[in-house]
Amino acid sequence: MADIIIDHVTKRFGTFTAVDDLDIRFSDGDVTCLLGPSGCGKTTLMRMIAGLETPSSGRILFGERDVTQLPPRKRNIGMVFQYPVMYPTLSVAENIAQPLKHDRSLSRGERERRVEEVLDLLDMRKQARAFIDDLDAGSRQKVAVGRSVARQTDIVLFDEPTTNVEVNAKLQLIRTFKAVTQRLKQTIVYVTHDQTEAMTLADRIALMKDGSIVQYDAPRRLYNDPSTEFGGWFLGNPGMNFIAAERRGNQLHATILDSPLDVASDLGGGEIVLGIRPENVLMHSEPGPGSVEGRVTEQTIGIAGRNLARIAVGSAVIKVKADGPAPVAADGTVQLSFPRDRILVFRNGARVTL
Amino acid sequence: MNAESLKRKGYYAVLWLTSLLFFAPVAWIVMSSFKTRNDILAVPPKLIFSPTFDNYLDLLDRNTSFVLQFANSVVLSLSAVVIAVVVSFLAAFCFSRFKPKGTNFLMFILLSIRMLPAPAVILPVYLMYANFGWKDSHIALILFYAMFSIPFSVWILKGFLDGVSVRFDETGLVNGGSWLHVIFRVVLPQLKPGLIAAFIFNMIFVWNEFLFNFIVGGVSTQNIPYALAVGTYSDGGLNWTFIATLTTIYIIPPIVFIYLFQKYLLAGMTFGTVRGEV
């Protein structure tokens, strides 16, 4: 069992810096999701952990062991790729057993026991004798997971394993991952650009941008308390609303506020922005305490039957996610209220607490 | 009969005619090997004759070096090509996976070596071999043939290796395989068509090789092309029975080989143009 310690690791490709002086520790037994947009360096970081890339500078440690210069096979890891690569002429069970054959410390009985265990875990006992060519992409990926965990390595890495799987199979696959990760107490690093996946699977999410980790927190905390504007925007569907605010003395004024917001006097200068999640904005037909007026510009039905409305308040456009449709049709007028405890304040892109 | 089937029949007629045209000389040689000397030279040519095996018996009886020549041909080509394919596979793997600086330039140089006419190198090679005392040595000749086969094999195999995704390597590596495991157990099996294509192309080259065998080789390394060239006039005129018999034996191994591996050979010939991604 091992922590993964990334000790000031930088990776450059030519003049491009893919990973920029990262310094972080992924705890033993945790499922950590590396989440971020394309090109943020999450895959490069994972490939360095796997040993497929060597850092330009810095060290990678598994527990006490410095693995920076070790080849992949000496690192005792398992990895599942975006594209499952299998022995097409072998059956599911044989594919899972394949890497075990190279471990001489395992007896034949132990090998068989592990394969059986993994088949149960994946709920694939019926397909054990099936050939890889007969399986769909989702099932192949499950076999790849099985092959990686059967070796019972300290660390298992997942590199966007659901990208090439169609939607229904994807949900099933994520359920399998969840079951597998809960049963096994291995340290797992999971790379994805899909926030739902990250939210479902992770104990902790490392949100990445431009080669750096922006925030490293539990999913709920990351969602509710983003430390940066980027975090608020990237997580959530749709992302957070951002409204420009103006500071006068110790008070913030914005179009969404009917009365100014008090702030500390040492806030400092710079661009101030208020953020609030679309589902935290309340929409009424009649004016209430603290409400401001807005005009409905667009209405759509979003995920899980939630209604999504875009409402113009002064010069700002606010996205609102509610259980029911807006009380008026497009171009009608509604009242919006913004609970004060849900409003986050950002200065120059970074969160400030009031 | 509709137009479609007529077109089809015409198409086959053309194919048959072309094949007959190309195979007529081969058929003549093979038939001649079963004829007597008089039958071969008969005018008009005899299509119907009573076959005889005398020529083959003759070849074994009188021409005492036949067994040596045939064995030499087999040993020289097989060992040279096996060496060439093994070396080329490893070289191509390196070029394809690690892409050392100047890979493209080196690949170009390799291909240009293939364009070098043999007579252009025969003199320096002869001088070198003569001075080293390597003339008439099997090992020296095998090494030379291997050297001559490697460039083209590297070229073919690199094309095939580029078609095998790096994902296979990486999956193998992170799941506990060594490089040796990845090279020989994961990548190699997927390269069968390429290996067989390289094998056959080079086999044909060495099997047909006369010039270097004649000049760099010697009495103990003589092969069938050498025997054909030397034996043609051995009878005080063109020795047709000898030529026909030896040629017939000579073409059997390549035909058998190609027949057995024809599906791979086709894949080998289309390399670079048809390449599937996994």
Image (cartoon, helix red, strand yellow):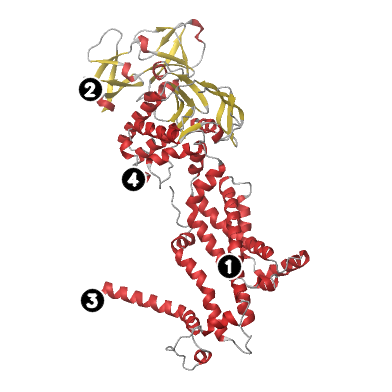
For the residue carrying disc 4, how many other residues have a C-alpha within 10 Å: few (<14), some (14-19), or many (20+)? few
The disc placed on residue A134 is 4
Label 4 marks a residue whose chain is A
Badge 1 amino acid: Val
Q: CA distance from mark 4 to mark 2?
A: 46 Å
Tell me the element at label 2: loop
Could you give the CA–CA distance between mark 3 and mark 4, rounded to whole angstroms?
A: 44 Å
Which is nearer the eye, B115 or A20?
Answer: B115
Q: Earlier in the sequence, mark 4 or mark 2?
A: 4
The quadrant of the picture occupied by the N terminus of chain B is bottom left
Question: Could you say which disc has been placed on residue B74 in the image?
Answer: 1
Residue type at mark 4? Asp
Label 1 chain ID: B
Asked which secondary structure carries label 1, the reply is helix
User: What is the crowding at mark 3: few (fewer than 14 residues within 10 Å), some, or many (at least 20)?
Assistant: few
Expressed as whole percent of the image width and height from the top left, the position of residue A119 reads 36, 34
Residue under label 2: A325
Tag in front: 1 or 2: 1
On screen, residue A290 versus residue A146, left or right, reads left
Does residue A104 appear left or right of residue A66 in this picture? Answer: left
Q: Mark 3 touching mark 1, by CB under 8 A?
A: no
Label 3: which residue? B1
Q: Secondary structure at mark 4?
A: helix
Question: Given the image, what chain letter belongs to the residue carrying mark 2?
Answer: A
Amino acid tagged 3: Met
Q: Position of residue A2 (x, y in %)?
A: 52, 23
The answer to whether residue A306 of the structure is visible from this angle is yes
